[in-house]
Amino acid sequence: MGSVQGFDSYIRVSRKGERDGDSYQTVEEQRRTIAETAKHKGVTLSDFEVIEEDVSGKIAAKDRRLEEILQRIENGQARGLIVAYQDRLSRGSLMEQAAIWERLEKAGARLITGDGTDSEDPNQELIFTVRAGIAREQWRRKQTDWDKSKRNAIERGIHFAARVPTGYLREKGSGPLEVDPAMAEVVVGVFERRAKGWNRGRIARWMNEQDATNGTATHETVRSIIRNRTYLGEARSGEYMKRNAHPALVSQKLWDEANAVSGTGARGTGEVVNKLLAIGIATCANCGHRLQVNMSGSTNRFPSYTCKHFHCKERGYAKASELDSFIQTWILTIPTQVSFITTEAKSDVAEAEKRLEEAQYDKQKLVRNKELRRLLSDEEYNAELEALVEAVTEAQIALDMSKREATEAKTMLALELWNEWDIDTKREYLSKILSALTVGSSKRGKVPLYERVELEFAVPIERPPRLLNEVL
């Protein structure tokens, strides 16, 4: 048992967020209150101080660093505990707060708070309990208000987070996110490279080669970008979500393909993954999550489609070569026609989409520029706005025409041109004719592939394909 020293200090801040510097005084204010309280009570502070930031008072003491102080007191290393305010100690249940009081009382220690609690007074336990109940009720009300704020913000399309995702901008106190032209292309590049099988380290190095990243991208940077559904145009917080809240940077198809590549997927050049057919298409028959590409085998490693969802008990699995061959065999037995934009026509459509995006950006920039609005006369402003609106309309018409021309020019039979298509065109074809591709568990190799794979077609077929087990 160590020698008994003074009173330990405990400081807690529920939400620090991005506050820092002169704008962030909460810790110093609590520290100053503790020092003044100790002086007023005639007690000495020890050198042991615990500061917890971004930590809720609802969390049990044993799961916070408050437990360190309680154990020091129980071991006789401190005479007691001082906090600036009682609610800094806990906002948990009354039972949780009563347990803290009881532990201090059993240890013969003293609890002092800057708002009047002093366990040395025998009448203070009742006051402590009443204050604990008030603090608990205040916490519940704040949680209700906080939940309403989140819901209202999401309904307005507001990104409800302190940090703005890379690739977007947000003016202070303004509405939904806006595209950051300097970083949007980098973000899209991250998704495209991940979809091709690049590992996260290689993508981070590529990001650092771009001027806009300042060389700060890491493995975790890439991971957070790939998993972030904000890039689909979604605003979300907990159970609340709104689609099309802001401009999307990537399509659902690209997002799915990038997230289908697991962290242990093909490494280095990504050549293996880039040749696979069912990336972003195959899903687990048990849990419905998309299968990820994983390198299997201990010595002779091979790519496989595997369900990696934590809670899935019967994970879908198939060797990549077997499932791709399976799909291709079915597809080539179906003489169906599907209209879609092929790889050859994508460049024209992409250029039209870019022109539309630029026209929309110029229009939004004018509308949001309050300083320019003040400088221009009504006639000048309206003329400029009318020209930009016309440019957006023309760009939209051009995009619609390019899509229609590309589609009308490429209505074809898959079995005629399958071997001439690149992998991206094949995947696009599959996404058009298949509404679902599910893969069940292999039961440790006991269930053959043709019994655990199901294909659902999104288009009419002229005749049913032969059974796969007969074809193979």
Image (cartoon, rainbow, N blue to C red):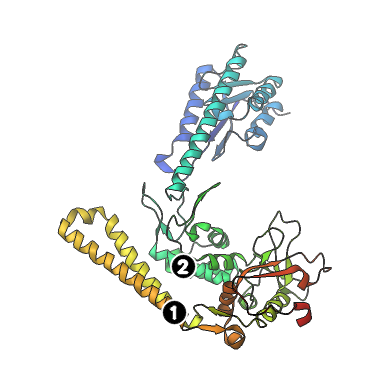
Mark in the foreground, 1 or 2: 1
| Cβ–Cβ under 8 Å for marks 1 and 2 | no
| Percent coordinates x, y for residue 429 in the rendering | 57, 77
Quadrant of the image occupied by residue 413:
bottom right
Quadrant of the image occupied by residue 253:
bottom right
- Amino acid of disc 1: Ser
Compare residues 275 and 35 and report the one nearer the observer. 275
| Residue 380, placed above or below residue 411 | above
Few, some or many C-alpha atoms within 10 Å of disc 1 (few <14, some 14-19, many ≥20)?
Answer: few
Q: Secondary structure at mark 2?
A: helix
| Residue 197, placed above or below residue 114 | below
| Quarter of the figure with the C terminus | bottom right
Q: Which mark is residue 302?
A: none
- Name the residue carrying label 1: 347
| Percent coordinates x, y for residue 466 in the rendering | 73, 80
- Amino acid of disc 2: Val
Write the residue at 58% across / 23% down: 133
Please state if 180 lies on the left or on the right of 256 as rendered: left
| Quarter of the figure with the N terminus | top right
Please state if 269 lies on the left or on the right of 15 as rendered: right
Question: How many marks on residues?
Answer: 2
Few, some or many C-alpha atoms within 10 Å of disc 2 (few <14, some 14-19, many ≥20)?
Answer: some
Compare residues 326 and 48 and report the one nearer the observer. 326
| Residue 365, placed above or below residue 61 | below
Compare residues 87 and 107 and report the one nearer the observer. 87
| Percent coordinates x, y for residue 423 in the rendering | 59, 80
- Name the residue carrying label 2: 186
Please state if 315 lies on the left or on the right of 118 as rendered: right
Instruction: Report if residue 123 is visible in the image.
Output: yes
Quadrant of the image occupied by residue 442:
bottom right
Extreme right residue here?
Answer: 446
